[in-house]
Structures are given as C-alpha cells and as structure tokens.
Image (cartoon, rainbow, N blue to C red):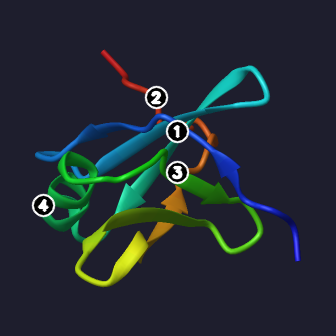
Amino acid sequence: MAPSIPVLPLLDVHRAVVELRLAGSWHSYHVADAPSLAAALANAVGLPRFDARARELSVRIPRAGKPAGQALFFSLNEFSLVLPTATLVG
C-alpha cells in the first residue's frame, strides 16, 4: 500500500471540487459530500493526507478519548484531462 502524503486542499463547496498540488502540478477532483469535507477541514487536528492509490483524502477531527483524533475519509474522483472535440460552425 502506498503511503499517504500531507496536502493542503483547496475546496470549492459550490462546485464540489477539491484541488491538490501533487508532484508540482495541480489536480482537480470531485468530492461527493463537499459540505461534510468543509466541516471536517474547519475542525481538522492536523494536515489532511491524500492516498493516491485509493484516491482518498483523510481528515482527522477531534474526538474525546482519542488524542490523535478520528479519521474521516473522503473519496475523490479525478476530472478527465480530455479536451472536448466539438466545434462551432458559423
């Protein structure tokens, strides 16, 4: 299993898009529950971590009796880089 890496995500709640800078370039992902991710990021007890193999963003939030917090996992779907082939005539 590939290790996860710490990231600083940019989140657009209205479009449900998370952007991550990985290996020097930006990648855009769709997240199904953007409001929950926003709430988790607002209460995070450490840096979020991204697992590229699982395409998951993990965020630790505070929990009583758990000094390291509780991990929440958010599945991310990367947007395709394929450009449209449609043309406009006229």
Q: Secondary structure at mark 1?
A: loop
- Residue type at tag 3: Phe
Residue 63: % across, % down: 26, 77
Residue linked to disc 3:
79
Which residue sits at x=71%, y=49%?
A: 5
Badge nearest the viewer, 1 or 2: 1
State the residue in front, 87 or 30: 30
- Residue type at tag 2: Thr
- Marks 1/3: CA distance? 13 Å
Residue linked to disc 4:
35
Which mark is first along the chain, 4 or 1? Answer: 4
Q: Which mark is residue 57?
A: none
Residue linked to disc 1:
84
Residue 69 in view (yes/no): no
Which residue sits at x=63%, y=42%?
A: 82
Residue 77: % across, % down: 51, 64
Q: Secondary structure at mark 4?
A: helix
Which residue sits at x=37%, y=24%?
A: 88
Residue linked to disc 2:
87
State the residue in front, 78 or 4: 4
Which mark is first along the chain, 3 or 2? Answer: 3
- Residue type at tag 4: Pro
- Residue type at tag 1: Pro
Badge nearest the viewer, 1 or 3: 3
Residue 50: % across, % down: 61, 55
